Image (tube, rainbow, N blue to C red):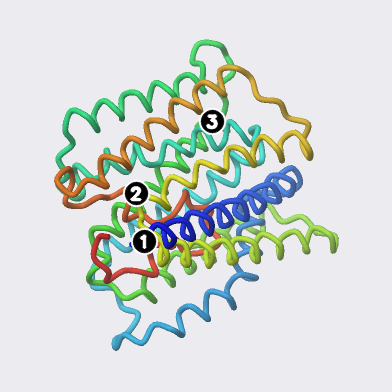
């Protein structure tokens, strides 16, 4: 691709992740009032008409019966429960801490690709994994008594997102886009709907508008990211996700009166450097045949919109 194409791809990716960050800020705002089950359920309902437009575009002959039902079920579980965990983490943790932990997703993708994809991780990527895990520990500060359920939820959210990405890489060449889109949505409706009677709280109109904003912003961000990956190389577009930490600092300060402590700043930098190095190594064709992080084509899942990778289930690695 030309330099102009990569520049356009990077610019659209920055716009996409800025929009995602705006949605996450709304999630944090509403998360102080409602259960993640209620927020995801109603946001999913509002997002359904938008996602349906994507499914209509799938002209591949076939039905919605998965060819790999167990893998599809595993991916669905990763997205559904990872989304719940991410919503909870955004509600109870500072935005910067939540992002710092969720940014460990490339590390987890690389680790999970070993048993799921048969990936061989050499010395360089192995060292990057160790460094990234050290960065997570810096953010968590074990032994200080500051670790809570929110930190565990953020780690599980990163794990669920990584699991869904790796499974997508394994079965994406065989399954239809519609299958990849429908089953996580169905899983959300069933799980969140079953929990809703126990957690439901009436919502004023302004909060309902917030749910609509979550659905709309995540949809727009997904479209921007689709355009970014079509315009630029994955190795250029993927690192732009780390720009979200800047929006986390801004939104956290403006709307939630949050600061950034030294441990979070240092740990975030270490995790980001580790993730960037993994992306750099995968961009070299001789390092990895699977390139699981690059082909994920998305950030962590929050359970509302499909992962961007689901829109390219039959496309080979870049």
Residue at 14% x, 46% y is 286
Q: Earlier in the sequence, mark 3 or mark 2?
A: 3
User: CA gap, disc 1 to disc 3?
Assistant: 41 Å
Drawn side of residue 279 relative to residue 7, left or right? left
Contact, mark 1 vs mark 3 (Cβ under 8 Å): no
What residue is shown with label 3?
Answer: 151
Q: Is residue 18 left or right of residue 305?
A: right
Is residue 212 rendered to the left or right of residue 276? right
Q: Earlier in the sequence, mark 1 or mark 2?
A: 1
- Label 1: state its secondary structure: loop
Mark sitting on residue 2: 1
| Disc 2 target residue | 163
Label 1 packing within 10 angstroms: few (<14), some (14-19), many (20+): few
Q: Position of residue 3 (x, y in %)?
A: 40, 57
Query: Is residue 203 rendered to the left or right of residue 99?
Result: right
Q: Is residue 9 above or below residue 312?
A: above
Query: Mark 1 or mark 2, which is nearer to you?
Result: 1
- Secondary structure beneath dot 3 equals helix
Which of 59 and 84 lies nearest the eye of the viewer? 59
């Amino acid at each position: 691709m030309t330099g102009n194409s990569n520049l356009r791809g990077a610019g659209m990716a920055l716009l996409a992740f800025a929009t995602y960050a705006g949605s996450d800020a709304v999630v944090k705002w509403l998360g102080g009032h409602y259960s993640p089950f209620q927020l995801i359920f109603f946001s999913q309902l509002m997002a359904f008409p938008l996602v349906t437009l994507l499914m209509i575009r799938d002209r591949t002959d076939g039905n919605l019966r998965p060819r790999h039902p167990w893998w599809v079920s595993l991916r669905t579980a990763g997205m559904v429960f990872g989304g719940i965990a991410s919503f909870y983490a955004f509600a109870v943790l500072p935005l910067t801490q939540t992002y710092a932990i969720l940014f460990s997703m490339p590390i987890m993708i690389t680790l999970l690709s070993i048993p799921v994809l048969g990936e061989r991780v050499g010395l360089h990527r192995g060292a990057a994994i160790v460094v990234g895990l050290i960065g997570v520990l810096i953010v968590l500060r074990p032994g200080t008594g500051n670790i809570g359920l929110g930190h565990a939820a953020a780690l599980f959210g990163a794990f669920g997102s990584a699991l869904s990405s790796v499974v997508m890489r394994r079965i994406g060449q065989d399954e239809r886009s519609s299958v990849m889109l429908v089953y996580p949505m169905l899983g959300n409706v069933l799980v969140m709907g079953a929990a809703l009677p126990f957690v439901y709280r009436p919502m004023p109109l302004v909060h309902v508008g917030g749910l609509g904003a979550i659905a709309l912003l995540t949809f727009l961000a997904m479209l921007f990211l689709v355009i970014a990956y079509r315009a630029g190389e994955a190795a250029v577009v993927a690192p732009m996700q780390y720009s979200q930490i800047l929006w986390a600092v801004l939104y956290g300060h403006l709307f939630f009166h949050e600061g950034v402590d030294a441990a979070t700043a240092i740990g975030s930098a270490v995790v980001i450097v580790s993730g960037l190095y993994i992306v750099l190594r995968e961009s070299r064709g001789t390092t990895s045949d699977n390139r699981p992080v690059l082909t994920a084509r998305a950030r962590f899942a929050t359970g509302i919109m499909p992962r961007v990778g689901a829109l390219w289930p039959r496309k080979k690695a870049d």
